[in-house]
Amino acid sequence: MKEKLLIGITGGLGAGKSVAGKYIESKGYPVILSDALAKDLMKNDPSVKKKLVRLFGDDIYIKGELNTGLLAEKIFNSSELLSKVNSIVHPPTIEATLNLAEKYFKKHDIVFVESAILYEAGMEDLFDFVILIYSHEKLRIERAMKRGLSKEDALRRMENQMKDELKKKRADFVIENNSTIEELHKKLDFVLNLISMTQS
């Protein structure tokens, strides 16, 4: 019987982890979007919402909807507030991620989890392998700006993420994404092949 593998995909803002995740998904593997789960919890989980209101006040929700602009403004200007939000959101996000992974494992031997803050959230030990998608800072800023962020916002968000040099030391696979999408796909194919070989 094949061993079940849970594999993390991470990378800083604009590195290309979502592009990598979509490609891996196109190959037939389930990919859990941990960041999307976190956003869903902040919008819909009563316990999380109550704690966020206690921390920021009623303005953090407008007609029941999360005020993402206000939240971003608060946490990206205060490492203390960011840490407090993380302590509220990370535990239930990890729980939701693992519950979803268990469902996928009923039909799949390998499940991937895409998370921008995999290391920052203390999720590293959940995974059999971690794939880091890495790009030069200049390229990351350009990509973030194409998605509508200002250069200042992009830099501020990057400052709140762990430095790539530290992530490189901790990741099992480091994929440089400084060229074309086709080149990224080739590198991903190579890593996917290596991972599948660990099961045989």
Image: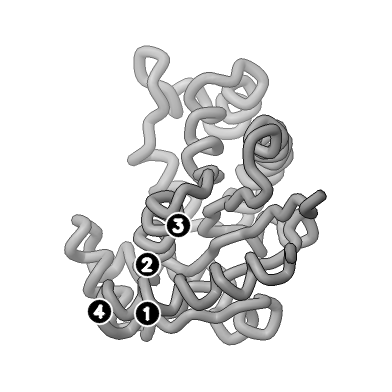
Query: In this rendering, which labeled residue sits more in front, label 2 or label 3?
Result: 3
The one nearer the camera, 197 or 188, is 197
Q: Are marks 2 and 3 in contact (CB under 8 Å)?
A: no
Q: Position of residue 4 (x, y in %)?
A: 75, 50
Q: Neighbour class for label 4 at 10 Å: few (<14), some, many (≥20)?
A: few
Q: What type is the residue that disc 2 sits on? A: Gly
As rendered, which of 13 and 85 lies closer to the eye?
13
Q: Position of residue 155 (x, y in %)?
A: 36, 71
Please report the residue visible at 61 percent of the width from the left and 75 percent of the height from the top: 194
**Of residues 40 and 178, which is closer to you in this image?**
178
Q: Is residue 36 above or below residue 23?
A: above
Q: Secondary structure at mark 1?
A: loop
Task: Name which quarter of the figure residue 196 lies in.
Answer: bottom right
Q: Mark number for residue 16?
A: 2
Label 4: which secondary element: loop
N-term mark: 1 or 3: 3
**Contact, CB < 8 Å: mark 1 with mark 2?**
yes
Disc sitting over residue 24 in the figure = 3
**Sooner in the amino-acid sequence: mark 2 or mark 4:** 2
Q: Residue at x 77, y 53 (%)?
A: 2
Q: Nearer the viewer, mark 1 or mark 3?
A: 3
Q: Badge 4 is on which residue?
A: 180
Q: Nearer the viewer, mark 3 or mark 4?
A: 3
